[in-house]
């Protein structure tokens, strides 16, 4: 693999982060009860260690519980029955990140067709293949689409290595699509994205996953965080970070390789993985239902991913 | 009806012979099995009694039996709502049962129980270790690409011995004569209740045949179901509190859900009646919460929990999956069971039976090719013109396609869809299923038969219903989607070995096991309105009858006093029913002189509030919402009332416009009054005095007191000449159903004050306001729950009661110098205000409506 579009600087390694993700809802009328589900606790393992984590809900919830979900994510359930017009959910974690570097040589040696064929061979019951196969399938927000297949065909060309496919996909999405906050919604389809050529990180992650799946490769959606750095000479602004999303592809013998089309790079130790799934719908940071007459609500999100002092 | 026990072969002559002859002559293609007639044209052994009965009934008799069955179903309110339809229809039933031989049944019963057990194990595996996939027996896509595979349900174990509680299996008999499975119904299978409803009707229209044919009963299945529901409760529950979760009255099978609720004795609840709190599910009751241990659901899984499944669902309970994960509630069938309604599984069941049960599969499925497998796909694509092609999952927009009925272009399109996503499709043999004789216009016609059987987890294994729901289709030979509503059949399984015809179901429960039925606030509210609308319909009908009679009298002998009285009564009608302007006000003159149009509207316009038809319509709707609370006779009564109005409507609006006194409203009004009396009788004599009944009675009493108060205020507020007042008083007494008592009791002292004695202050006359107050007090005393909320209502009652008791009817009847009965008016206004306040207090204090359920969303309306 020769033309990886990696950033000029070397990947960052070995970091300890303090991560605070705070969401606040305000309503124009009283809410009697809120039931919520959050994927805000970072995953443990896979190049990162969760040293501590805590979710605080205000008003105090009657119930606050967590379990490991189908995809191995930590999933938090809460119920607030105190009447409220404001609800905040704050996740506070300390995570140590130390990812092994992506094995570019191995990725470069794997032909994508070979990967496709191994996944398609149902007789091959190797556990990691079995685990990856479900991610070949379309999912609720990433439906099969001829437009995506046509777009992918320009990148996933015969004879290329898996490394080249990922590289090409990352570069093309990064170069051909503009990051425009608010340009899309959960209802925007990939076909619409391909026409509009602008979106946010979730869209680019979805598109990358969709392209890989249309080629018969296993791909999943990853939600998480990326450390941002203030411009030189400027102080870091509180709450300036945001939740982020990228894609991950399965490489037999290598494992899952995460890459970030929004920033045109493989993920490194500046990234913290929150949760993964088939698409955004499996792992929204926070969703819920409320009993209320209120018709207008405001949501405010503040994320701080800060290198920890003792990190 | 034949009473012969060993009839001769009836195929010798007549109907059955003709049926057999038609069967053999119509044979084209593969020989199809007929349930009644063998290939040699002879009636099969088990069918001879039925053949003899059909013979002896003849065409006219058969048609009559079929019509009787239809009438009984209509009278019992056995309905269903066709998919996408807005109106409920009477359930379709062919009166001739399908007989199943007992030796054949013996084999089938075990095979069905095995299939249920296999699906149970598979369900446990798919949401547990997934050994079936790991081992390579089951391809990944069949499970993971199916929308019924709920990732949120992963690793939630069953609390009882079984994952799968109730299993429906659709069978058809192939050309080889063997039954084979065409579909598994395991999401929330319907039909078991309809099977029972069918049996009740068939046993009434063919009583002799039913008595003499030795067949298995259906009762044991439902007792097994009750036992099974108790067995699946969380171990912490002392005695299981079970509820039946319904999507509501708009459901296709709303009738059946209410029917099962009554049959099993469990409350019928909607998602909004339940709440998750403290890690468990509760049912809302009046002012408190009652724990729920087991939910027998009829809501499709995707709608059951808006938090973890479809967020827009208003039919579910947020947090339900969380409670299930904590093991505090059992939901049957498990929310994840939809993945088993999956034709892709069929080719793999033999291998799965070996893997999961260690035994061969006993019951064949319809030959099925899963297109995810390359060889199978090739076969399907090569045989598109003869196979039925189905997607893995039933869903909106995806139907099954009969390859033989597609055009070349449609077939090409289907081919492309299969090739784009092969694992999502299967091809199936278009099974030419067997036929069964069905009554069509008094003749026997062969109709394709599908038999839905039911297995329920109970005791150590599965109990299979000894019967089931037959469905006969007009589609001639192939398993294609039905074009018209189904006609069902009862299925009779022979039982000549003398198993007990009655199984004991009476068993003593220890006191701690008995829970009083919890009534949801929604139900109490509906019962309250049921009482109000029933009373309103009766009162309106009686008043209209009194007024139209007066109008008829005036038409035949037009006297001045009659005209004056009529004006008073017509205006009173408008005021009491709240249908202004009508006969009241300055512009009313024309309508008073020619009242036909307005009277017809007051009778028949079901969309105008205050009319009789409106009250009847709302009554029927509210009754439908709480049908599980009511006697089945209710539907016969409401049906006759609606018919009476409908017939009048047809004669008024269908032909000449209201033709003066010649046109008779009395039949229709008598029909309504009669119906409402029957309904009052049913509620008085057939309903237990539970909380629901108390609210029904509250509603009825408040409504009646309001009506009498309003009627008196509208007609007696001023003094008129004695001739006019005589006519008015008489009509008021007739409308108040008190004329006979009045004449007997007050012969010598006829007048306003004695009328007020009888209709206002009397505590013994069931039509008097005073009497209503006493009954209201009684019902309030018996409503359970905290005293505070009742106290508000009771205080209002105490006030109006005191006000009424202090009244002197002689004083009230006395007009002032201007002829106005000031005291009476004042009293009636106070009573009316008090009653309105009381009704408002009942609504405010007892019928608390939860705020709407919404999604938590970002400020732009999207959770992005």
Image: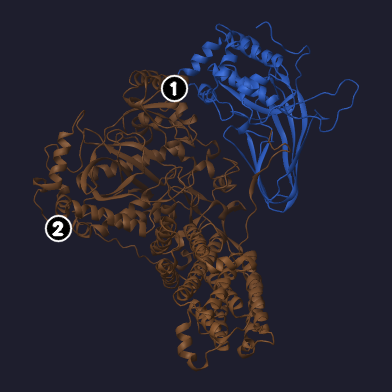
- Marks 1 and 2 close (CB-CB < 8 Å): no
A118 horizontally vs A63: left or right: left
Is disc 1 placed on a helix, strand or loop? helix
Q: Could you say which disc has been placed on residue B843 in the image?
A: none
Which sits earlier in the primary sequence, circle 1 or circle 2? 2
The answer to whether tags 1 and 2 share a subunit is: yes
Colour chain A appears in: blue
- Residue B852 in the image, given as x and y percentages of width and height: 64, 50
The residue that disc 2 covers is B2
Using the rendered image of the protein, determine whether residue B238 is visible from the camera's viewpoint: no
Q: Could you say which disc has been placed on residue B422 in the image?
A: 1
Cα separation, mark 1 vs mark 2, equals: 57 Å
Q: Quadrant of the C terminus of chain A?
A: top right
Question: Which residue is most to the right?
Answer: A233
> In this picture, is B524 found above or below A44?
below
> In this picture, is B372 found above or below A8?
below
Using the rendered image of the protein, determine whether residue B127 is visible from the camera's viewpoint: yes
B362 or B676: nearer the viewer: B676
> Which chain is displayed in brown in the rendered image?
B
Colour setting: by chain
A37 horizontally vs B735: left or right: right
Question: Which residue is most to the bottom?
Answer: B748
- Displayed quadrant of residue B413: top left
- Residue B703 in the image, given as x and y percentages of width and height: 56, 71
B167 horizontally vs B574: left or right: left
- Displayed quadrant of residue B838: bottom right
The 10 Å Cα crowd at callout 2, few under 14, some 14 to 19, many 20 or more, is some
B732 or B799: nearer the viewer: B732
């Amino acid at each position: 693999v020769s033309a990886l579009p990696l950033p000029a600087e070397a990947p960052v390694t070995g970091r300890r982060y303090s991560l605070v993700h705070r969401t606040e809802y305000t309503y124009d009328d009283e809410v009697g009860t809120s039931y919520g589900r959050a994927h805000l606790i970072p995953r443990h393992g896979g190049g990162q260690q969760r040293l501590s984590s805590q979710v605080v809900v205000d008003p105090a919830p009657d119930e606050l519980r967590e379990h490991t979900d189908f995809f191995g994510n930590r999933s938090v359930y809460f119920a607030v029955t105190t009447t409220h017009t404001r609800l905040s959910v704050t996740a506070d974690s300390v995570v140590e990140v130390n990812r092994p570097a992506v094995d570019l040589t191995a990725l470069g040696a794997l032909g994508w067709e070979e990967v496709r064929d191994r996944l398609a061979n149902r007789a091959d019951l190797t556990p990691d293949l079995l685990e990856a196969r479900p991610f070949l399938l379309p999912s609720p927000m990433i439906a099969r689409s001829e437009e995506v297949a046509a777009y992918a065909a320009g990148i996933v060309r015969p004879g290329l290595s898996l490394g080249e496919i990922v590289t090409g996909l990352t570069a093309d999405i990064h170069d051909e699509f503009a990051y425009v906050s608010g340009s899309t919604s959960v209802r925007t389809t990939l076909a619409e994205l391909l026409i509009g050529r602008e979106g946010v990180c979730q869209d680019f992650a979805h598109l990358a996953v969709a392209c890989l799946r249309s080629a018969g490769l296993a791909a999943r959606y990853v939600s998480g965080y990326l450390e941002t750095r203030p411009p030189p000479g400027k102080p870091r602004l509180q709450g300036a970070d945001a939740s982020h999303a990228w894609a991950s592809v399965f490489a037999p013998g290598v494992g899952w390789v995460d890459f970030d089309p929004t920033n045109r790079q493989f993920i490194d130790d500046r990234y913290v993985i929150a949760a993964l799934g088939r698409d955004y719908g499996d792992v929204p940071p926070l969703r819920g239902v409320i009993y209320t007459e209120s018709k207008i609500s405001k949501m405010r999100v503040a994320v701080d991913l800060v290198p920890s002092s003792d990190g | 009806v034949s009473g012969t026990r060993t009839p001769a072969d009836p195929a010798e002559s007549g109907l059955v012979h003709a049926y057999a002859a038609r069967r053999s002559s119509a044979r084209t293609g593969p020989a199809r099995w007929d349930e009644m007639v063998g290939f040699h044209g002879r009636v099969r052994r088990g069918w001879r009694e039925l053949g003899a009965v059909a013979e002896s009934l003849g065409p006219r008799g058969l048609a009559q039996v079929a019509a009787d069955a239809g009438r009984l179903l209509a009278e019992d309110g056995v309905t269903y709502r066709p998919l996408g339809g807005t109106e409920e229809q009477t359930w379709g039933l062919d009166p001739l049962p399908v007989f199943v031989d007992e030796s054949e049944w013996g084999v089938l019963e075990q095979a069905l129980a095995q299939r249920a057990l296999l699906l149970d194990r598979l369900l446990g595996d798919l949401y547990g270790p997934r050994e079936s996939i790991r081992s390579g027996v089951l391809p990944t896509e069949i499970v993971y690409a199916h929308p019924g595979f709920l990732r949120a349900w992963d690793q939630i174990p069953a609390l009882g011995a079984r994952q799968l509680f109730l299993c429906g299996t659709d069978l058809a008999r192939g050309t080889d004569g063997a039954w084979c499975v065409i579909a598994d119904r395991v999401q929330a299978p319907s039909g078991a209740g309809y099977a029972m409803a069918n049996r009740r009707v068939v046993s009434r229209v063919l009583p002799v045949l039913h008595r003499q044919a030795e067949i298995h009963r259906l009762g044991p299945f439902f007792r097994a179901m009750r036992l099974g529901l108790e067995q699946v409760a969380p171990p912490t529950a002392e005695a299981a509190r079970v509820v039946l979760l319904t999507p509501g009255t708009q459901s296709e099978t709303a009738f059946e859900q209410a029917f099962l609720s009554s049959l099993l004795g469990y409350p019928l609840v909607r998602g909004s009646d339940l709440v998750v709190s403290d890690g468990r599910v509760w049912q809302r009751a009046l002012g408190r919460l009652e724990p729920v241990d087991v939910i027998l659901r009829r809501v499709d899984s995707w709608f059951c929990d808006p938090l973890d499944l479809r967020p827009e669902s208003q039919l579910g309970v947020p947090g339900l999956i969380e409670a299930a994960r904590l093991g505090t509630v059992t939901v049957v069938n498990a929310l994840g069971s939809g993945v088993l309604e999956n034709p892709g599984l069929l080719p793999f069941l033999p291998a799965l039976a070996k893997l999961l049960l260690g035994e061969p599969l006993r019951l064949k499925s319809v030959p099925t090719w899963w297109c995810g497998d390359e060889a199978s796909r090739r076969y399907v694509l090569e045989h598109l013109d003869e196979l039925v092609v189905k997607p893995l999952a039933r869903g909106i927009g995806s139907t099954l396609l009969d390859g033989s009925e597609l055009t070349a272009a449609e077939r090409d399109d289907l081919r492309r869809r299969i090739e784009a996503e092969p694992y999502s499709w299967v091809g199936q043999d278009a099974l030419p299923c067997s036929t069964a004789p069905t009554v069509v216009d008094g003749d026997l016609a062969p109709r394709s038969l599908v038999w839905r059987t039911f297995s329920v987890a109970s005791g150590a294994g599965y109990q299979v219903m000894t019967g089931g729901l037959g469905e006969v289709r007009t589609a001639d030979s192939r398993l294609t989607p039905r074009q018209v509503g189904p006609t069902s059949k009862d299925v009779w399984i022979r039982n000549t070995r003398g198993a007990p015809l009655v199984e004991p179901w009476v068993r003593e429960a220890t006191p701690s096991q008995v829970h009083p039925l919890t009534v949801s606030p929604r139900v109490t509210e509906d019962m309250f309105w049921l009482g109000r609308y029933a009373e309103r319909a009766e009162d309106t009908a009686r008043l209209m009858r009194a007024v139209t009679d007066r109008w008829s009298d005036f038409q035949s002998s037009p006297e001045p006093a009659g005209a004056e009285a009529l004006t008073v009564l017509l205006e009173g009608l408008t005021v009491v029913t709240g249908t202004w302007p009508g006969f009241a006000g300055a512009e009313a003159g024309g309508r008073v002189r020619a009242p036909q149009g307005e009277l017809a509207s007051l009778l028949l316009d079901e969309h105008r509030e205050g009319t009789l038809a409106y009250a009847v319509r709302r009554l029927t709707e509210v009754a439908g919402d709480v049908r599980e609370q009511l006697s089945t006779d209710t539907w016969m009564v409401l049906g006759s009332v609606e018919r009476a109005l409908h017939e009048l409507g047809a004669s008024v609006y269908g032909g000449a416009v209201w033709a003066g006194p010649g046109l008779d409203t009395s039949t229709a009004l008598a029909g309504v009054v009669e119906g409402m009396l029957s309904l009052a009788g049913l509620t008085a004599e057939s309903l237990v005095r539970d909380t629901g009944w108390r609210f029904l009675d509250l509603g009825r009493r408040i409504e009646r007191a309001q009506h009498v108060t309003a009627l008196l205020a509208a007609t007696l507020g001023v003094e008129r000449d004695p001739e006019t007042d005589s006519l008015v008083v008489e009509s008021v007494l007739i409308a108040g159903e008190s004329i006979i008592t009045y004449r007997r009791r007050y012969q010598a002292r006829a007048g306003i004050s004695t009328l007020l004695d009888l209709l206002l202050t009397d505590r013994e006359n069931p039509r008097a306001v005073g009497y209503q107050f006493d009954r209201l007090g009684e019902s309030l005393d018996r409503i359970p729950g905290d005293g505070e909320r009742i106290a508000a209502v009771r205080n209002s009652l105490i006030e109006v009661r005191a006000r009424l008791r202090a009244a002197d009817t002689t004083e009230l009847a006395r007009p002032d110098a201007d002829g106005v009965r000031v005291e009476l008016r004042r009293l009636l206004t106070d009573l009316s205000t008090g009653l309105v306040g009381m009704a408002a207090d009942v609504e405010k204090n007892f019928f608390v409506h939860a705020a709407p359920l919404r999604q938590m969303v970002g400020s732009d309306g999207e959770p992005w």
